[in-house]
Amino acid sequence: MSDVDERTVKPGGRDAAAGLSARRYRFTGYDTEVGPLGHLHAERERLAGLTWEHFDARPLGATLGAELSGISLADDLPDDAIAELRRALIDHKVLFFRDQPLTAGQHVAFARRFGDLEVHPFIAANPEHPELVRFEKSADVGGYENGWHSDVSWRETPSLGAVLHAVAVPPTGGDTLFADMAAVYDGLPDDLRAEIDDLVAIHDFTQVFGHTIKADARDEMRRTYPAVEHPVVRTHPESGRRLLYVNRFFVSAVKGLGVDEGRALVDRLCRYTELPEYQCRFQWEPDSVAFWDNRAVQHYACSDYWPDVRIMERASIVGDRPR
């Protein structure tokens, strides 16, 4: 940030950043930048101007996340309300709801309004509803979801979206963060976007779940869920926006690159996801619900509440093959 280092700022004088253009500046000697992410402005303004008929929406992050009120997910909502929720999901990318005391059956019924539901082959489910993955953490079961990822990118057709219901939450901690992967892509340097636009990544469930499967069952699971190829940059099928689509959890390689080179590239790309300006953060309360577009965002579940209890149930909606 040599532009700032050369300034002389007197106590009580103007802001040290006064006169700087609205762009990023690099700290001298470090791979760190500061300054506004100006490309977020247009989307932030667009989202702030949206209005809805069946609910109210309060934007949470610059370009993603909105807390909705005035609607009950336990109700048998009319088709036009479901259609409006779907449009809000595409626009805001993740929707949050408070005070939604859903039964497991109501949870499944609401999620099913948006498509067929997945059954996860590796994570325990609600005993009465196999469509509900159950994350039950305690002193005996730690939370290992604290890495940026999109769900089941190792499937040939990863999830369209997910509806997560807070059954029990700790008194502090356990927040979930979301990142806007279209904004991340738009903010990449031009030369990096050109480098990755036509690349393909290999996604593999064994990156995370391989150690949980007994050796005699691993080959059968591999035949059922072979490693899949997805574009490093996908196009959202409804919004038409380009999105960065790699994560450290499930990407094992980049096609055409050596192992070390591919992993270094994925790691470099994932570091952009970690910028808070691309994120929103949700603090859970009992019976809160988050509904996210798994094609458009990645998420990170903070694991800062051990040994307290945190119980969440998730219904995932079958999606499309990334293109």
Image: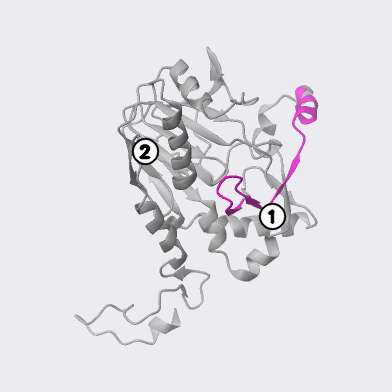
Considering depth in this image, is 46 or 7 the residue closer to the camera? Answer: 46
Tell whether 256 sits left or right of 319: right
Task: Please state which amino acid type lies under the numbered disc 1.
Answer: Arg
Tell whether 116 sits left or right of 2: right
Residue 136 within the magenta-colored segment of the rendering: no
Q: Quadrant of residue 260?
A: bottom right
- Which residue is depicted at the point 41% across and 24% down? 77
Judging from the image, what secondary structure is the residue with disc 2 in? Answer: loop
Q: Which residues are magenta?
A: 217-244
* Quarter of the image where the N terminus is located: bottom left
Q: What is the number of the mark on residue 144?
A: none
Q: What is the number of the mark on residue 263?
A: 1
The answer to whether the residue labelled 2 contacts the one labelled 1, judged by CB atoms less than 8 Å apart, is no
Task: Please state which amino acid type lies under the numbered disc 2.
Answer: Gly
Q: Residue 90, relative to residue 110: is it above or below?
A: below
Colour setting: one colour
